[in-house]
Image (cartoon, helix red, strand yellow):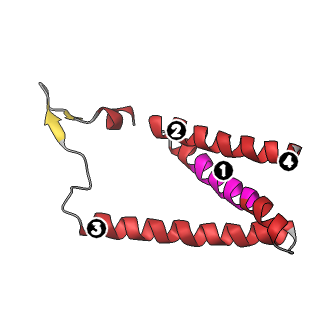
């Protein structure tokens, strides 16, 4: 029972961390969030599957980590292909200011 609560807490923490990272422009936060998603997916999935399958927990966790690697790589590959094929600009637009400096229009990019 305590391991179920631990995994539920880890899953809830991963969801909350994802929401916090998306609200802030932090590259380190995105890296940590990605690793937390990897760990939570593989460990929680292995916990769920270990009851149904007659395989060791560590083997299921390793298999699910590899599955997550394949799925996330496929998703990123499709996203890059879609961005490359779209007509949207890759870089934000700049607005002229009073001086010679150009400012970014979108407030989220100003935080970077």
Magenta stretch mostly in which secondary structure?
helix
Q: Give the residue at mark 3.
A: 84
Q: Does the magenta-highlighted stretch encompass residue 98?
A: no
> Which quarter of the image is occupied by the N terminus?
top right
Q: Nearer the viewer, mark 3 or mark 4?
A: 4
Q: Nearer the viewer, residue 33 or 13?
A: 13
**Residue 24 at least partly seen:** no
**Contact? badges 2 and 4 (CB < 8 Å):** no
The 10 Å Cα crowd at callout 2, few under 14, some 14 to 19, many 20 or more, is few
**Contact? badges 1 and 4 (CB < 8 Å):** no
Q: Give the residue at mark 2.
A: 19
Lower position in the chain sequence, tag 1 or tag 4: 4
Q: For this view, does 89 lie left or right of residue 16?
A: left
Q: Give the residue at mark 4.
A: 3
Question: For the magenta stretch, what is the residue range?
Answer: 31-44
> Which quarter of the image is occupied by the C terminus?
top left
Lower position in the chain sequence, tag 3 or tag 2: 2
Q: Secondary structure at mark 4?
A: helix
Q: Give the residue at mark 1.
A: 36
Q: CA distance from mark 2 to mark 4?
A: 24 Å
**Residue 47 at least partly seen:** yes
Lower position in the chain sequence, tag 3 or tag 4: 4
Q: Nearer the viewer, mark 3 or mark 2?
A: 2
Residue at position x 53%, y 65% from top?
A: 72
Indicate the position of residue 59 as horizontal and vertical percent values: 81, 72
Indicate the position of residue 103 as horizontal and vertical percent values: 22, 33
Q: Nearer the viewer, residue 15 or 69?
A: 15
Lower position in the chain sequence, tag 2 or tag 1: 2
Occupied quadrant, residue 89? bottom left
Q: CA distance from mark 3 to mark 1?
A: 29 Å
């Amino acid at each position: 029972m305590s391991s179920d609560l631990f995994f539920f807490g880890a899953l809830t923490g991963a969801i909350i961390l994802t929401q916090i990272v998306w609200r802030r422009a932090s590259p380190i936060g995105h890296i940590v969030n990605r690793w937390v998603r990897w760990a939570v997916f593989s460990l929680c999935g292995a916990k769920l599957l270990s009851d149904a399958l007659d395989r060791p927990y560590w083997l299921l966790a390793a298999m699910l980590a590899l599955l997550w690697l394949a799925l996330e790589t496929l998703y990123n590959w499709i996203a890059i292909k879609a961005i490359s094929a779209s007509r949207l600009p890759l870089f934000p637009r700049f607005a002229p200011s009073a001086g010679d400096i150009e400012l970014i229009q979108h407030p989220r990019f100003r935080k970077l």
